[in-house]
Image: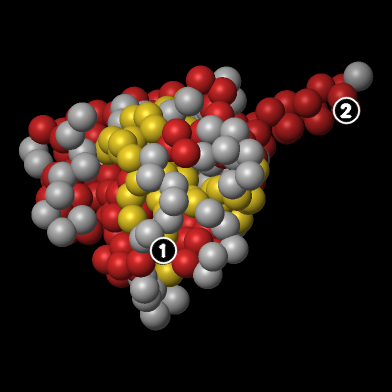
Amino acid sequence: MKNFFVTTVLTILIALAGCGSNKDSNTLVFAGSGGYPPFNFIDENNQVIGFDVDVGREIAQRLGKEMKYTTTAWDGIIEGLRAGRYDAILGSMAVTERRKEVVDFSIPYYYSGAQLMTRQGSPIQSPDDIGEDHLVGVTTGTTFEQDARELGAEVRLYEDDNQTLIELLNGRIDAVITDRVVGLNAMKKMDKGDELTLTGELLRREDCAIALRPESDRLQTRIDSVLTTMHQDGTLSEISEKWFEGTDITRS
């Protein structure tokens, strides 16, 4: 009995020490896919950059911490968060009721929406033209998959939007559903991007926020406070205008 008591006390002390270490860490680890320009993507120097990365760096600085931005496959990113591999997902994640069942969200840091894209000259002139004979590409694990299914299309899943848009340009699929800002950026920056077009109005608006583990309520409160200040003092607007050629996507 005595040995059992000593072992139990030591186990508790070790657990508490571990919690204290995590709480006092000087590094704030954010995660994103790394394949979602201009939000988070790998540059020619193999560094992850983008709107999300700059927002994360500013948040960490205001919290007195160093930022580490890690990349991981989007379809497993929530599982990685729940497993504790990073502190939060700052990767342009849309707030949905389904996701709220397993993670908590900060206040939104920007707003966008689901956009259908096609090639110039396509017979698809609006979402209403999409049917079961059409192949629509989306990134695995995104809310855009449901949008495509609701249009009645056959869905093709890809790792990121670089792949979906290349497949669209090569004529292997009929359309892509992605974030509107991503689509606009691709049209300006991709090789042959001028052969793409935004088709129809937004399918729906999305609030994009930072996802955290439910037990990270103290960190969430601090991040919410920082984001509120960044909205008010114009910092988020400045970061947006840097990455989106003067456009402010942080206002609803």
- Residue on which the image places disc 1: 41
Instruction: Determine if residue 249 is in view.
Output: yes
Contact (Cβ within 8 Å) of mark 1 with mark 2:
no
Name the foreground residue: 186 vs 50.
186
Instruction: Find the residue positioned furthest to the right.
Output: 1
| Disc 1, SS | strand
Q: Which residue is drawn at 43% across and 55% down?
A: 122
Q: Which of marks 1 and 2 is nearer the N terminus?
A: 2
Report how many numbered discs are placed on residues in the image: 2
Task: Inspect the image, locate mark 1, and give the three-letter code of the amino acid beneath it.
Answer: Phe
- Residue on which the image places disc 2: 3
Instruction: Determine if residue 222 is in view.
Output: no
Name the foreground residue: 28 vs 178.
178
Give the quadrant of residue 219: top left
Q: Where is residue 135 in the image (x, y as percent from the top left)?
A: 60, 49
Q: Compared with residue 175, is residue 206 higher up or lower down, i.e. above or below?
A: above
| Disc 2, SS | helix
Give the quadrant of residue 66: bottom left
Task: Inspect the image, locate mark 2, and give the three-letter code of the amino acid beneath it.
Answer: Asn
Give the quadrant of residue 8: top right
Mark nearer the viewer, 1 or 2:
1
